């Protein structure tokens, strides 16, 4: 009888152990995430050239001291995957002793070195035109990428110049490059009315994220 009970206890214990073995089975599920933000960075560079109309329809690089040109540039740095890059953030000109037949050509190169699509917007609050009634506005000729910009007075100059520049840049995909050539010229046909005059214009732009 005791032997029978012993066998029964061993059998029950074995069954309990089998149950414990089944209960030990498990399944694991894990979620992990790393979020790394991109960068909005448009690299801007500039090249300037001063030329004189020879009266025969050709222009030569100005090599004399009659025309004075100085420009103030402000470069800032931005982080990129391939290292530090410089970008032009401010470009200011002081063009002195301008006379009929002279022109300044500025070539601006915009390269989207960021990781997202961008668009350009006009920062009108930081833009201004001076000397609204200046006769120089009527004679000074502006072109943007070869297209004349109508700037008969200061009231139209601000939006006309800004729109012409923005239309040439538009939206930029990552890695895209746009070139904008701006020409400011006082033509040979300019009369004595434009002598000893002064005008100033400032255009400010903002590059923004563009998801559309």
Image: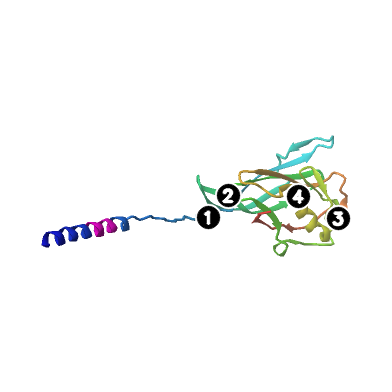
Q: Earlier in the sequence, mark 3 or mark 4?
A: 3
State the extent of the magenta-drawn residues as a range: 14-20
Question: Do callouts 3 and 4 mark residues in contact (Cβ within 8 Å)?
Answer: no
Q: Badge 2, how many Cα within 10 Å: few under 14, some, many 20+?
A: some
Mark 4 or 2: the one toward you: 2
Q: Earlier in the sequence, mark 3 or mark 1?
A: 1
Circle 4: element type:
helix
Residue 115: numbered disc: 2
Mark 1 or 4: the one toward you: 1
From where the camera sits, is residue 97 visible? no
> Alpha-carbon distance for marks 3 and 2?
40 Å
Say if the magenta span includes residue 188.
Answer: no
Residue 152: numbered disc: 3
Mark 3 or 2: the one toward you: 2
Mark 3 or 1: the one toward you: 1
Which residue is nearer to you in this view: 98 or 16? 16
Tell me the quarter of the image containing the N terminus: bottom left
Q: Residue at x 80, y 35 (%)?
A: 58
From where the camera sits, is residue 1 visible? yes
Circle 3: element type:
loop
Residue at the spot of label 1: 37
Residue 167: numbered disc: 4
């Amino acid at each position: 009888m005791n032997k029978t009970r012993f066998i029964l206890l061993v059998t029950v214990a074995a069954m309990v152990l089998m149950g414990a073995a089944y209960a030990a089975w498990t399944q694991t599920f894990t979620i992990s995430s790393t979020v790394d933000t991109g960068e909005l960075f448009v690299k801007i560079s500039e090249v300037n050239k001063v030329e004189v109309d020879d009266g025969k329809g050709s222009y030569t690089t100005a090599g004399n001291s009659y025309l004075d040109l100085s420009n103030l540039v402000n470069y800032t740095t931005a982080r990129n995957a391939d290292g530090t890059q410089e970008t032009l953030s401010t470009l200011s000109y002081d063009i002195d002793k301008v006379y009929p037949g002279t022109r300044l050509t500025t070539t601006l190169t915009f390269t989207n070195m960021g990781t997202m699509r961008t668009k350009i917007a006009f920062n009108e609050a930081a833009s201004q035109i001076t000397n609204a009634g200046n006769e120089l506005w009527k004679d000074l000729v502006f072109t943007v990428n070869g297209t004349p910009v109508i700037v008969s007075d200061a009231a139209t100059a601000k939006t006309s110049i800004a729109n012409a520049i923005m239309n040439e840049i538009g939206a930029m995909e990552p890695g895209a490059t746009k070139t904008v050539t701006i020409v400011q010229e006082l033509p040979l046909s300019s009369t004595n009315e434009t002598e000893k005059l002064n005008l100033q214009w400032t255009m400010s732009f903002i590059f923004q994220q563009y998801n559309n």
